[in-house]
Image: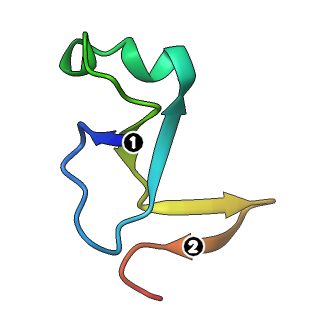
Amino acid sequence: MVTDICGAGLGDRVLLARGSAARVPSETSGVPTDDTAVMIIDEITVNNQPTYQAGTD
């Protein structure tokens, strides 16, 4: 079960908090969840090279 607190849409890549960390945000307090989507990923850069940019794949 994943709870979305960042408003992600279909196809968005997100950063997940797992386990007990998934229940820390106030939005998930008391919610039975395994994972929480906490952030939408706009770009991933490795060694100064962009490897992912939202909207380009």
Quadrant of the image for the N terminus?
top left
Q: Residue at x 41, y 61 (%)?
A: 42
Residue 43 image label: none
Locate residue 38: give its quadrant. Answer: top left
Residue 27, position as x, y percentages in the image: 19, 20
Residue 5, position as x, y percentages in the image: 23, 36
Q: Is residue 31 left or right of residue 17?
A: left
Q: Residue at x 36, y 81 (%)?
A: 55
> Front-most of 4 and 48?
4
N-terminal label among 2 and 1: 1
**Image vertical order of residue 56 relative to residue 5, above or below:** below
Q: Residue at x 55, y 23 (%)?
A: 19
Separation of disc 2 and disc 1 at Cα? 26 Å
Q: Amino acid at mark 1?
A: Met
Q: Nearer the viewer, mark 2 or mark 1?
A: 1
Residue 47, position as x, y percentages in the image: 81, 59
**Image vertical order of residue 13 relative to residue 10, above or below:** above
Within-10-Å neighbours for mark 2: few <14, some 14–19, many 20+: some
Residue 52 image label: 2
* Residue that label 1 marks: 1
> Front-most of 50 and 21?
21
Locate residue 39: give its quadrant. Answer: top left
Q: Amino acid at mark 2?
A: Tyr
User: Disc 2, disc 1: CB below 8 Å?
Assistant: no
Residue furthest to the right in view is 47
Q: Secondary structure at mark 2?
A: strand
Q: Residue at x 50, y 31 (%)?
A: 17
**Image vertical order of residue 47 relative to residue 22, above or below:** below
Q: Secondary structure at mark 1?
A: loop
Residue 8, position as x, y percentages in the image: 25, 56
